[in-house]
Image: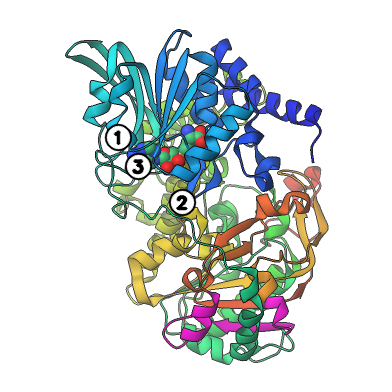
Amino acid sequence: MKSPEQTRTERERMIEESIARRGITDTRLLDAFRAVPREVFVAPNLASAAYEDRPLGIGRGQTISQPYIVAATIEALALTGTERVLDVGTGSGYAAAILAKVAREVHSIERIEELAQAAETRLVSIGASNVHVHVGDGTLGLPDHAPFDAIAVAASGPVIPQALIDQLAIGGRLVMPVTSPEGVGQVLVRVHRVAEHAYEKEELGEVQFVPLLGAQGHRPGETAVVTAPRLARPGSFASAARIVREASEPLDDIDSASIAPLVERIASARIVMLGESTHGTSEFYRLRARITRELVTRHGFDFVAVEGDWPDAARVNDYVAHASAPHTRFPFTPFDRFPQWMWRNREVEGFVEWLREHNARSKGRGVGFFGLDLYSMYTSIGVVLRYLAEVDPHAAETARERYRRLLPRREDGIERLLPAPRRLAAAEDAVLANLRDLLQKRLEYAQLGPERYFDAAQNARVVASAERYYRAVYRGAAESWNLRDSHMFDTLRILLAHFGASSKAIVWAHNSHVGDARATEMRVRREHNIGQLARQAFGDVVRLVGFGTHHGTVAAADDWDEPMRVKNVRPGHPESYEHVMHEAGISAFVLGLRSPQRAAVREELTPARLFRAIGVVYRPETELASHYLEVVLPEQLDELIWVDETRAVTPLPELAKSELSKLPETYPFGL
Ligand code: SAH
């Protein structure tokens, strides 16, 4: 439990960093955020995450909105304190509580009775006596209480409901997210009723909300599913463990036991994705390398694409391809950014050395190694400019001028590593112009060979995606997550096309990217990932393989940009799949989950349970809130590889900053 003092400090920090610094200046509104305890509005097990600037589950597949979005919505209503406000989508009641502080009277309406009741109880408990909670379809408004001086809608509909427009007082404002016609993006829209029949409409930016369901909203089932998976009852764990024990293929030694049955099941696919439930577990990297070697040597897979940066992986690719003169290229040290250990470790090194030998032995094109990620904006700019300087010096000058807009300036604030969002947005056209120019000159630039051109073009794409990504980071978690996974998936497609119509790909990325997002609570947050996108685009020729562990040690950091440590992994939570697998009592195994052969296993494992995700940061103290997701395992993955007790990866020695510049670049890891 946190002390009241700690909670106040966290709340203050959230207001400063996530709200004020992003440009919300109304002091009455900031004071309202100070006065309302957000921890009261989330489930007790999420209270420790109450001051993170993100939406959190509140049950029934709904979420409490991200604080910044609540602030931006309310600020757009331009309240002075005298207004009567309609709040559509009570949810947790948090937004209503903030509104109650900055308006005279609030009517809040929620379609799910259970949520409305819980919200009402909380609002009473904090003494918000000027809020009235109603149960009903908010797309019809509350005619008995109209007109309203302001209307805030916290769920996204296909159009602004006519009933709400009719119930808006003259001079009043309405703010609501509207779903795009294609059903993908949402835009926050403000309507100002300036006269009886005159409205001014304005778009405030892209957002992510749950759907508005009702007579003048979306129909249930028409948009993505909105109910979270239902958790399995603890009683069902013993029988699940028994069936896992019977159905699994034990691996008594993960480095030598046969993986033939698994390989046989996945080898005919065009895309095999190999996940991991942590970024720092030795066994996961070793097993992925073993499976990959089999797929490459015996089944003709063409390349490995990893959750790492493009230019960094390109350096590895040069190494494994025995490229002749890679050093004429833009100089930098691969994989020297946080988290270094994710790719700079002995396990990956071993695989890279193997791949280099394999390519030396084999005739023909050789197996490639590529990066799917987009965190290399400045390195990618460097690569593009260096390339253009060689093939087209005039174009290089133009490109340099355009990319200059992405450099941070003093006015962005001293602590910024990137330009402020507004200036990023202004750079978008310039960045896209560079990409377009490069793509149009494909034939002209043939002199340095197709591989160099391909690499430069992909770096220009990375810059464009990164610019959008960093801009989205300011707006909300789901949108930036989706941009990143869409970029990774586009990159995979580009690679498949590059290698030809019958090419076959292996992907190494975290379970949270590989496992189909639609089978996890990510769906409720409207997040997608490469596993889902691949299944949707390629169907039956995709195999998603996930990994998991119960306890052991892991390489991870306490926080972003902190040093790597070897941390203890807590035993799996009693309501988790980890618990089921551990109870099966086998130290390591492969479990096929694919229908229809596995009907009994699938049935037993289908009620949703928790599944742990450890990234580069591991916080055992808040594990339940920060690392467990609700998933339906047999829908999420085709295969699960289980290692009950695991060890941390062995990182290569850290590079001192002064050494970075003088390292020879003959070896991908600079060692
Ligand atoms: N403002 C809330 C956000 C809740 S999410 C908070 O701060 O916690 C949006 C809510 O809108 C969900 O609880 C959902 O059940 C509700 N909702 C969706 N369609 C609705 C409708 N037609 N009428 C009323 N509520 C609706």
Quadrant containing the C terminus in the rendered view:
bottom right
Q: Residues in magenta? A: 581-605
Q: Mark 1 points at which residue?
A: 139
Distance CA(mark 1)–CA(mark 2): 21 Å
Drawn side of residue 580 relative to residue 655, left or right:
left
Q: Let me know if residue 97 appears in the view.
A: yes
The vertical placement of 207 against 105, above or below, is below
Numbered disc 1: secondary structure: helix
Residue 307: image location, x then y, percent: 56, 59
Q: Nearer the viewer, residue 254 or 204?
A: 204
Camera-near label (3 vs 1) is 1
State which quadrant residue 415 falls in. Answer: top right
First along the sequence among labels 3 and 1: 1
Q: Which mark is residue 524?
A: 2
First along the sequence among labels 3 and 2: 3
The vertical placement of 528 against 476, above or below, is below
Distance CA(mark 3)–CA(mark 2): 15 Å
Q: Nearer the viewer, residue 297 or 646?
A: 646
Q: Which mark is residue 590?
A: none
State the residue at coordinates (36%, 45%): 438
Q: Mark 3 points at which residue?
A: 185
Amino acid beneath label 3: Gly
Does the magenta-highlighted stretch encompass residue 593? yes
First along the sequence among labels 1 and 2: 1
State which quadrant residue 19 falls in. Answer: top right
Residue 391: image location, x then y, percent: 41, 46
